[in-house]
Image (spheres, rainbow, N blue to C red):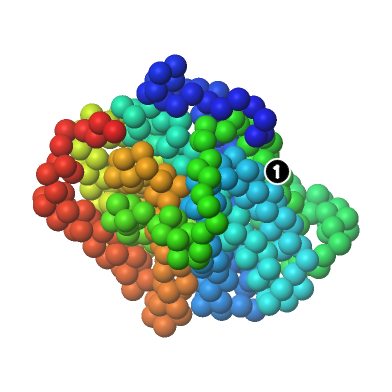
Amino acid sequence: MSSAPPVPTPGAPGGSDRILTRNFVYACGAGFLFTISFVMFFPTLPLFIKEFGGSASFIGVLIGGASLVSLVIRPFTGSFVESMGRTRFLMFGALLMAMSSLSYELAGTLAALWPARIMAGVAMGFYFTAAMAYIGDIAPPGKRGRTMSFYGMFTTLGIATGPAIGSWILTSGSFRGLNEHLRRWMPGTGSDVSDRYNFAVVFALGCLFALGSAAFTRRLWEAHKPVKRQSEGLRAMVRHSVSRPAIFPSILHAGTVINVATLNVFLPVFNEQERLWSNIGLYYTVFAIAIFASRLWGGPLLDRYPRAYTIMPGLGMMAMGTVLLALVHEPWVIFFTGVMMGAGSGMAQPGLQAVTIDRAKGKNLGGASATFAIGMDLGLIVGITALGAVLDATNFEVFFLSAGIVTLAALAALATGTVRDPEARSRRAQT
């Protein structure tokens, strides 16, 4: 991995202006598989916790706990990724995610689930910081919006297909025999919590997806020359890991993640209560198709027009889908929400990533990536933990309305910032 020759910097003498390079393809494959391994537990782990007798609040705390761990280590990940390179932390994150997936099998109580979620949080903290910095390294400056959009198409596709895969495997009768074999072969007791679900298959498959990500990562060439610094204290390390220019788009990113997280985690519980669809996994399929389509045509728009002109409609679509779900409990609304959420996030997220890299102006991409990822962590914590408590205290109507209002607030903040910032209204970013 680290012995391969470095990649020429895009835009530099001898560099490539192409998006579709060897490293880009392997990075997309690695990101896709890693994301599936992480998010396939969003709709399955709540049912696992319910079988143990856990409440909606505990579901939110446990699943959001991974993001809390990730948030705690973010002040260090940016500095490490900048000073030690990207690929080693991509590999570390993938292997740790594989260990986390198998650790659920060892859980015999609710408390025993915490080590697995802590490992998942550390894995996510390092992987997504290193991945965004790596794509920033290899993206041609004049095609940064498209590069971020196309890479994000694979990771967000993982976010969409992972829950669908997990939901389908969990309840499919086709995997009953394999599940019984795995329960005998695997040494833990976690999958024995219920005979209704194929938990053992889900745990094993999550591990295999993470190992697949590690295999793709092994093929990557390091595109960044590590910045060797003298021994630095804690405050200096935090300073290098938090980028001030990246703070505003990171806050907006949190607003989008809150919406996506609340639906991906709690929609199966909502559907079980309302009995709208027989297979809620189809929602994630609709979501994935909408993401794929919006990324294909939305990416070029990000480079052709000001970023905000693509991001704002995306935020509006996400808010619309969530609010309507709170007001109308009909089967067609879930389909409509899947389209709005997929298309909206497919437009907003890569735009915010591109804005983050633009604002960094080629300096300390590790810190900019870590700061952007902090937005994701905060969105997951608020969207899953805090709104899980809201759900326990109120109902699904208030729950979905709250998520929609947060995204509307992000839209209002971006619109205000665009009006006040002449650079944000420029035709396109050049660096």
Place of residue 356 in the rendered image (x, y in percent of width and height, measured from the top left): 33, 46
Q: Quadrant of the C terminus?
A: top left
Q: Quadrant of residue 250?
A: bottom left
Residue 230 appears in view: yes
Q: Residues within 10 Å of mark 1 (few under 14, many from 20)?
A: many
Q: Nearer the viewer, residue 181 or 241?
A: 241
Q: Is residue 89 above or below residue 192?
A: above
State the residue lying farthest toward the right. 184
Front in this rendered view, residue 132 or 298? 132
The reply, left or right, for residue 268 in relation to residue 173 is left
Identity, as a three-letter code, of the amino acid under mark 1: Leu
Say which residue appears at 35% left-offset and 32% top-offset.
144
- Residue 104 locus on image (x, y percent): 72, 63
The quarter in which the N terminus is drawn is top right
Q: Residue furthest front?
A: 230
Q: Is residue 222 above or below residue 171?
A: above
User: Residue at image x 45%, y 65%?
Assistant: 235
Image-based side of 273 in relation to 364, left or right: right
Q: Residue at x 11, y 52 (%)?
A: 420
The image shows residue 321 at horizontal and vertical percentages of 32, 55
Q: Is residue 307 above or below residue 206?
A: above
